[in-house]
Image (tube, rainbow, N blue to C red):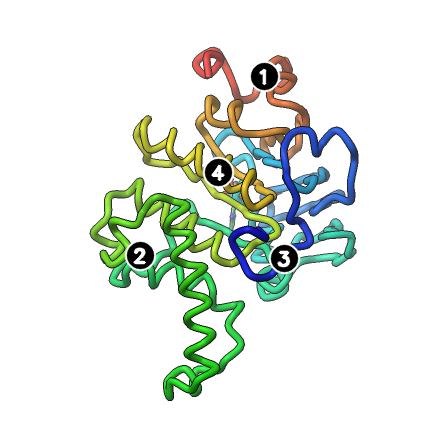
Amino acid sequence: MAALFDTASAFTQPSSAQALAAPQMPVLRLEDIHLRFGGIKALQSIGFDVQPGEIRAIIGPNGAGKSSLLNVINGVYQPQQGRLTFAGQALGLMRPVLAAKLGIARTFQNLALFSGMSVLDNIMAGRNLHMRCGLLSQALRLRPAVREEVTHRLVAERIIDFLEIQAWRKVPVGRLPYGLQKRVDLGRALAMEPKLLLLDEPMAGMNLEEKEDMSRFILEAREEFGTTIVLIEHDMGVVMDLSDRVVVLDYGRQIADDTPDAVRANPEVIRAYLGSATQEG
Ligand SMILES: Nc1ncnc2c1ncn2[C@@H]1O[C@H](COP(=O)(O)OP(=O)(O)OP(=O)(O)O)[C@@H](O)[C@H]1O
């Protein structure tokens, strides 16, 4: 993110599938994660890593445990068993506040935007963690607060340019079509300068053109800012096109962790999930 943001990230590097050729310290490693809700075994012995600059997909049928897994990664759910390591730091378990501090950002299946606020202000909301001046100095318009706001606005404007949403920067988000709202949600998350970006069904409810746009922005975010991405997606075409490696869940179990092509050819995956209807994806 050096080109866009003022602070360099530990994971800022040109990223591509080539980066995966040489093993590096993973951004994230999950080991033997078990999560239960009463009698429901939502996750059973899940373990995989995410390399810097990688786009990792998590797929599986409805109820397979995908959202639960994302919630374990950002600390919303506490697994009964397992270990999580972030950027080489063994954390045991994650907590939401810690996740935010460590630089884990997330978009949601059901958008989490302020619908009455403008595009710019929603993206500015993503800068909150980076703001050092308190509310009082902001309210009194003290000089350091004004200076800081200018810097953050600059970052927000650059993200708006990057996502090609300049024309709507002053428009309340609630008035935008759904596809654009999803783009603003991505912008809000990118504004956090995340080391790890979790995308929960970024293409849900989009038409083909919107999906193509969103795919392009995800790939460009990785290329330009070196963002490491974990995404849940139901559209197999999107998963195959975007991801470097794919984790497949079925009834809370991890049945595959491989490249898109290998996953596509895996008989257990085909049986559990892909099926004939999605083979063309
Ligand atoms: N907060 C919760 N309380 C109880 N059970 C839950 C909770 N969250 C998830 N579950 C259960 O855990 C299992 C996995 O659910 P999860 O939402 O993680 O699956 P998913 O793969 O994301 O599904 P979908 O594709 O439909 O979003 C399901 O049986 C679900 O009912």
Of badges 3 and 1, the one in the foreground is 3
Amino acid at circle 3: Ala
Q: Which mark is residue 119?
A: 2
Callout 4 secondary element: helix
- Residue tagged by mark 4? 218
Q: Are marks 2 and 3 in contact (CB under 8 Å)?
A: no
Where is 104 relative to 127, above or below? above
Callout 1 secondary element: helix
**First of labels 4, 3 by sequence position:** 3
Where is 35 relative to 249, above or below? below
Q: Position of residue 74 (x, y in %)?
A: 59, 54
Q: Position of residue 62 (x, y in %)?
A: 47, 33
Q: Position of residue 201 (x, y in %)?
A: 44, 39
How much space separates mark 1 and mark 2, taking CA atoms?
38 Å
Q: Quick one: label 4, few (<14), some, or many (20+) residues within 10 Å?
A: many
**In this image, 111 relative to 101: left or right?**
left
**First of labels 3, 1 by sequence position:** 3
- Residue tagged by mark 3? 8
**In this image, 136 relative to 100: left or right?**
left
Label 3 near ligand 1 (CB < 8 Å): no
Q: Quick one: label 3, few (<14), some, or many (20+) residues within 10 Å?
A: some
Q: Are marks 3 and 1 in contact (CB under 8 Å)?
A: no
- Residue tagged by mark 1? 264
Q: Quick one: label 1, few (<14), some, or many (20+) residues within 10 Å?
A: many
How much space separates mark 4 and mark 3, taking CA atoms?
20 Å
